[in-house]
Image (tube, rainbow, N blue to C red):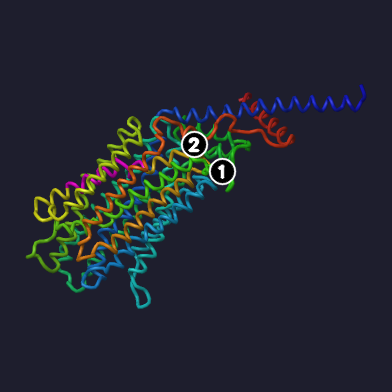
Amino acid sequence: MAPKDQEALGRNALDDARSLEDSASLDTLNEKRRATLAEIDSARFSWFHVRVCLVAGAGFFTDAYDIFAINIASVMLGYVYGHGHKLSANQDLGLKVATPVGTVFGQLVFGWLGDVYGRKRIYGYELMLMIVASFGQALAGEAHAANIIGVLVVWRFVMGVGVGGDYPLSSVIPAEFASTRIRGRLMIAVGANQGWGQLAAALVAFVIIVAYRDTLLADDPAVFAHVDYMWRLLIGLGCVPGAVALYFRLTIPETPRFTMDVERNVRRAARDVGRILAAGTGGNDMDARGERVRAPRASRRDFARYFSKRENLVPFLAMCYCWFAIDVAFYGLGLNTAIILQAIGFGTPNAGVTGTAAVYENLKNISVGNMILIVAGLIPGAWTAFLVVDYWGRKPIQLLGFVMLTILYIIMGFAYEKLTATSAGRKVFVFLYCLTNYFSNFGPNSTVSVFPGESFPTRYRSTAFGIAAASGKLGAVVSQVGFGKLVNIGGENAFVPHLLEIFAFFMLTGALATLVLKEGKQLTLEELSNEKQEGFIEERGSKPARRRLAQSTLSEGQADGMH
């Protein structure tokens, strides 16, 4: 045989050997990835899961406090800065819509950043924005060149950006750390902190109002100087839970799924999982040797390819619409509870009570009314969903909630005049209002964040969640603008019953959209991603690259064997 032929045969034999070596190493890496995911998905409930739930939940607590405190603070602001001791419709709308508008921006930007730079690297910055914005609102002042309502609108937009950033990160992180059998409960437990945040806002307002009772009663009715103290304390205290949670949020480790599937470092992710499950502590193994493998990578073309498939696009659009629909009603009423309570005359001061005494009674009654609605509806609804979500499923809960809300809003809207005509009728109306809060949280308000949080590939999960959540806050913006512009058509609060009827329509369409969603109960995130998992880690394109991959894998395997 000629020397050249012998050399060619030798090269081919070497390439075949290297190819087999590469194949073996790739099989090893795919098996390591499968084993790591299985370890996460089957892990027992631990202190680390509790820590993730508390740290993420603190963000949702702060979100809800900051968003819904304005419900009572806007009434206080009206007494101090409004003409006739009441904010104009546009001023009230500006204060209430600024945060949802900022939230849309924050959800889109932070959702994308969470997929590009990682959950850990971004987590905490959104909380810093909320803390600074809450503090800024409390210190806002008025001057010849600056209207205080305008200043507050700007600060509430900035706060909204932080609130929006919290949504994708505080939902995706628990989802990616949770085992399959408890994932729904962990995600709903995080979201359930919104109810506690709303209750805290109403409770803090009540305590402040009662604490300032004597000084408020002695105030000049033309100025109400101490009401100015009250709203500043109410808003400013919103930064306290965020400040407490900030350190713990900055120490949350990167999720192993992001480390494996986006950073493409399988070995480091495996070691991180071992450390987390064994010790229940955070911190990523930054000393683990880098092992960049070839796996599907995020790109515009890949994003378009994935979401152009019907089985991915249709559920995604349904998730967006369901979130839009529930937020139309939830924020339409939630941010205007004070107006609804005043419209039906619930807790309104007696006609004989006037001056500063009437102001005190009105503020106190609004706070008490908010607490009743939250305790009787929102909190028990969320925890009912928590108890059954991993047994009954996400889809049945959401469908039941939308159907019940449709029925309740139809009754409240079409029977509004009769229900609000008598004292007994108003009590029935409040009871029905509590039921809407209950079935909002034992229904779509709890589950709309679970669907996108456990769907889609890791490389797009935060981005897709941000888009779905932004769709919801777009619904909040629409409802706020609509409520503000329509509520007084035909007289003060005369359009309220028709708004309730409109909400019923959105609930019905939300129920229809829920039908196309995929049930995620007891399925892994990878099964819900609609992506092939066999051979997820692929062979590199060039022979030198394959050779480096094989040599790196073998040497690291030998190093592990020495330990």
Q: Which mark is residue 529?
A: 2
Task: Indicate which disc, 2 or 1, sits on the residue closer to the N terminus.
Answer: 1
Residue in the foreground of this view, choosing between 319 and 169 = 319
Mark 1 nearby-residue class (10 Å; few <14, some 14–19, many ≥20): few
Mark 2 nearby-residue class (10 Å; few <14, some 14–19, many ≥20): some
* 3D distance between C-alphas at marks 2 and 1: 14 Å
Amino acid identity at mark 2: Ser
User: Which residue is drawn at the image coordinates 34% and 45% (left, top)?
Assistant: 510
* Boundaries of the magenta span: 431-447
Whether 21 is drawn above or below 211: the answer is above
Q: Which mark is residue 305?
A: 1
Whether 173 is drawn above or below 101: the answer is above
Indicate whether residue 23 is drawn in magenta. no
User: Which residue is drawn at the image coordinates 27% and 61% (left, top)?
Assistant: 73
Residue in the foreground of this view, choosing between 515 and 220 = 515
At which x and y percent is residue 188?
35, 39
Identify the image quadrant of residue 32. Answer: top right
What count of labels does the image hold?
A: 2
Amino acid identity at mark 1: Arg
At which x and y percent is residue 485?
29, 64
**Screen quadrant of the N terminus:** top right
User: Which residue is drawn at the image coordinates 41% and 43% (left, top)?
Assistant: 171
Indicate whether residue 433 is drawn in magenta. yes
Q: Report the residue that reaches farthest toward the right.
A: 2
